[in-house]
Image (cartoon, rainbow, N blue to C red):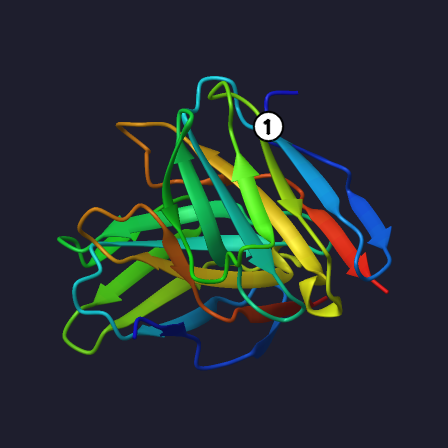
């Protein structure tokens, strides 16, 4: 079945360093991918998204890379700050008529001062 | 506040009781979603509405679960005869049709604890 998973459950980085969070997906028909950030006690918050016809998209301090050949998605955060500490989820939309997003397990990003 | 509102934020109940959660989406959003999240896991899709029509339901939504969106605005999620396995965070999200339709805006969630 469809699944989205993360390589690393926990990532610890020093403040100011760049962070890379990885995600693997299994459904080659997925046409849309999105990253969310979730802080403790809060709902997921949108970070950045990318359609399957793109391989890179940049936002403010964040970049998402999509490699459809190996079904891999990554989120790069530049100059990581303590406020970036959270759990990060990737999610995919399966394409076709569905509008649901399928979420991966999540990666905890811990930023050390 | 123009975000997604959920009520109550926390609910503790005894096994076998019924519970109901309410979600008020962003006013101009006509799509509304319910997800369930357990500790350490990503949100799992339960169901989604476009206006008042329930268009998709997950197999996770057993017959003890029912969701409604009677007037295409707020939605309720009811769980009957709660079980300990129902303990989770229930997240509501909304989105618009058209540009940005795929971006779900989530509420803070309703945490259910079944004793």
| Residue marked by disc 1 | B3
Q: Position of residue B15 (x, y in %)?
A: 81, 62
- Name the chain letter of the residue that bears numbered label 1: B
Q: Label 1: how many residues lie within 10 Å, few (<14), some (14-19) or many (20+)?
A: some
Instruction: Classify residue B87 as left or right of residue A25.
Output: right
Instruction: Classify residue B83 as left or right of residue A5.
Output: right
Tag 1 secondary structure: loop
Q: Give B19 or A109, whichever is nearer the viewer.
A: B19
**Residue drawn at the location 21% of the way across and 46% of the way down:** A97
Q: Give B23 or A19, whichever is nearer the viewer.
A: B23
Q: Is residue A18 above or below residue B67?
A: below
- Seen from this angle, which residue lies furthest bottom? A7
Q: Position of residue B64 (x, y in %)?
A: 60, 54
Q: Give B74 or A86, whichever is nearer the viewer.
A: B74
**On-image quarter of the C terminus of chain B:** bottom right
**Residue drawn at the location 31% of the way across and 71% of the way down:** A2
Q: Position of residue A24 (x, y in %)?
A: 33, 75
- Residue A93, image quadrant: bottom left
**On-image quarter of the N terminus of chain B:** top right
Q: Position of residue B81 (x, y in %)?
A: 72, 56
**Residue drawn at the location 65% of the way across and 61% of the way down:** A85
Instruction: Classify residue A82 as left or right of residue B66.
Output: right
**Residue drawn at the location 52% of the way across and 45% of the way down:** B34
**How many numbered marks appear?**
1
Q: Is residue A96 above or below residue B14?
A: above
Q: Give B52 or B90, whichever is nearer the viewer.
A: B52
């Amino acid at each position: 079945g469809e699944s989205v998973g993360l390589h690393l459950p926990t990532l610890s980085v020093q403040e100011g360093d760049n962070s890379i969070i990885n995600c693997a997906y299994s459904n080659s028909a997925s046409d849309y991918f999105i990253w969310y950030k979730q802080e403790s006690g809060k709902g997921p918050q949108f970070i950045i998204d990318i359609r399957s016809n793109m391989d890179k998209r940049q936002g403010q301090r964040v970049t998402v890379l999509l490699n459809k050949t190996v079904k891999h998605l990554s989120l790069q955060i530049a100059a990581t700050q303590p406020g970036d500490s959270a759990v990060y989820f990737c999610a995919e939309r399966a394409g076709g008529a569905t509008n649901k997003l399928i979420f991966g397990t999540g990666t905890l990003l811990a930023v050390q001062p | 506040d123009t975000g997604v509102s959920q009520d109550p934020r926390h609910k503790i109940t005894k096994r076998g009781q019924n519970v109901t959660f309410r979600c008020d989406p962003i006013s101009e959003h006509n799509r509304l979603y319910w997800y369930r999240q357990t500790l350490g896991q990503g949100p799992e899709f339960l169901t989604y509405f476009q206006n008042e029509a329930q268009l998709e339901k997950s197999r996770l939504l057993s017959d003890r679960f029912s969701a409604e969106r009677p007037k295409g605005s707020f939605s309720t999620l009811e769980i009957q005869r709660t079980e300990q396995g129902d303990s989770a965070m229930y997240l509501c999200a909304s989105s618009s049709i058209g540009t940005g339709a795929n971006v779900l805006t989530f509420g803070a969630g309703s945490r259910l604890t079944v004793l």
